[in-house]
Image (cartoon, coloured by chain):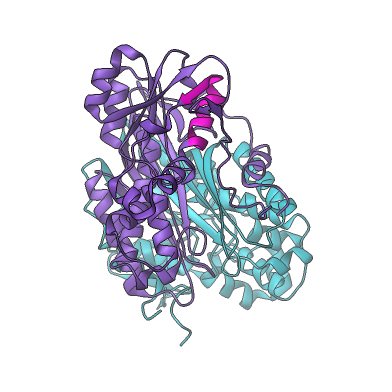
Chain colours: A cyan, B purple
Amino acid sequence: MRLGEFELIRRLIKELPPPSEKVVVGVGDDTAVVKAGRGYRLLTTDALVEGSHFKRAWKETVEEFFFLLGKKLVNVCASDVASMGGEPKVGLINLGVPPDGKEVELIELYRGVGEAAMELKVDIVGGDTVKSGTLFFDMTLIGESPSYMLRSSAKPGELVGITGTAGDSRGGLELLERGRSEPKYLIERFLSPKARVREGREALKLGVKCGTDVSDGLLFNLGTIAESSKVRIEVESSLIPLSQELTETFGKEKALEFALYGGEDYELIITFPERLIKKVEEIGFKVIGEVKEGSGVFLDGRKVRTKGYDHFKEEE
Amino acid sequence: MRLGEFELIRRLIKELPPPSEKVVVGVGDDTAVVKAGRGYRLLTTDALVEGSHFKRAWKETVEEFFFLLGKKLVNVCASDVASMGGEPKVGLINLGVPPDGKEVELIELYRGVGEAAMELKVDIVGGDTVKSGTLFFDMTLIGESPSYMLRSSAKPGELVGITGTAGDSRGGLELLERGRSEPKYLIERFLSPKARVREGREALKLGVKCGTDVSDGLLFNLGTIAESSKVRIEVESSLIPLSQELTETFGKEKALEFALYGGEDYELIITFPERLIKKVEEIGFKVIGEVKEGSGVFLDGRKVRTKGYDHFKEEE
């Protein structure tokens, strides 16, 4: 593959017809937004593929591995909807079953999907189950919302807030790669993240206009806000919330690196006017920086690279 | 895999929570049906996987192979919506890119998706592009309709109608398997079927209540109507429409076998009261049989097996 992931996607999208006027937001934000009655429909899809997103070997170190993976798929999709301020409603699941696919594993996977769907009040209404050389499963999730947050709505003068803690998911992945099963907290943060649906909806209700989730890494996702909103974002590393489990397991420096570049935390990032600070904190967001005029992302006053890991391009 | 495809699916579905009252039709018909305002949303998803649904080698015999495959994916999904009488509206596409995936092929694939989306007036609003050991692509399609046809609505005394011709798709597949590239008509019927959206909508408008599409084979799909409607279906082999290309290439007997068991024709089957016969024929349906009290599918007076090809179970 000569093109990187994002260039390939840009190239593929060019082949699609221009969207109709019902499509308010097309490809490019966390979810697509389509006008529906007096509100909006939010649409997203995510795939998990063996070898790329998980390794079968991990089931040896993690109990209920496929159960957690099933929960993850639903929450990853729900996080996209949450980052727009919406409520997940209806989902469809595709499953690619490899020749050596084990029924008990697939059933465990669906048990995870089912539990997450129950927790998030999502109706799973369909799917396609097919033979495949590689185990994959994906979900398309449709949410609803009276309005929505966008990456491109950040305004100079606003503050930047984040839910929970950053970097834990990458910490969990590192542990799995090393064949370790403790601390369980970190591994579950990677294998079974929780979509911040409540936080997204409450932020939207407060009037917050700009949101996204930490899917590709904090700096990368801040970069998408900076670029699409045409603003500069300045964050303070000392303000970035890190879990005790992460800093104790990997040390402060590594923990911060995971938080900045790790991805898959599925925490929400919003930008909001200062007058909302108390209410935003009550919802569960912590302030980590501010929005300025300009461009780029700055950490402790220095411009930083915001590039995430590119899944497609050969390593340089 | 010890379980067959349908048993596995039944087992997996058991793990999902019961649907909410907004879900009018869940897993089990051509699309799910969800109440939306005064009408209904129809949701379906289909996956095409290399090795299972197509072979890369076929690109040697077929020009614009990936372009046709891209069109197929959209039409296969649209056919599900058509068989409920709905109008396709919004789609999302996932793409699993193998290590040896060629950009030109993927772009050609998307050109096909784009052209079919344009023809069917479908907005493609999102997708996920991931690394995968096996090339796969799938689509989730959302349609709309003021009401809908079901497999389970056939009534004794009704007639059975079908659009177009049956068996061509299987004929095309046979040609591809033999490395042949002619007749092109048959190969394109397999690689690039056309969803019968107009026919489905017009049948629904006439008041037709029961419909499905020929995805797994004519007898198999008639069997799903018979079983879910608790009726007997009797068809006459002499009435089943066969194309000249199919009978000339394979002979009358083989052509009929393809029509009965072949699948992937994506023609529509409906059952309708006799008083509608003229109008139904004007839309493009041909009568092939009738609905009776009882159970099973009968061909020329004899009960026939309606089992389709099972993708999962090892060959017996």
**Residue B244 percent location from the top left of the image:** 28, 47
**Residue B18 percent location from the top left of the image:** 62, 30
Residue at 47% in and 58% down: B53
Which one is in front, A256 or A43? A43
When the figure is inspected, residue B293 is found, relative to residue B296, above or below; the finding is: above
Residue at 73% in and 72% down: A249
Which residues make up the magenta segment?
B219-234
When the figure is inspected, residue B113 is found, relative to residue A218, above or below; the finding is: above
When the figure is inspected, residue A111 is found, relative to residue A137, above or below; the finding is: above
Q: Quadrant of residue B277?
A: top left
Which one is in front, A12 or B112? B112
Residue B294 lies left or right of residue A279; in this view the side is: right
Residue A200 lies left or right of residue A61; in this view the side is: left
Direction bottom: furthest residue: A316
Which one is in front, A4 or B75? B75
Residue at 45% in and 35% down: B31
Residue A271 lies left or right of residue B50; in this view the side is: left
Number of numbered discs present?
Answer: 0
Q: Quadrant of residue A118?
A: top right
When the figure is inspected, residue B314 is found, relative to residue B159, above or below; the finding is: below
Q: Tell me if I can see residue A157 in this picture.
A: no
Q: Is residue A139 magenta?
A: no
Overall secondary structure of the magenta stretch? helix
Position of the N terminus of chain A, as image quadrant, is bottom left
Q: Tell me if I can see residue B6 in this picture.
A: yes
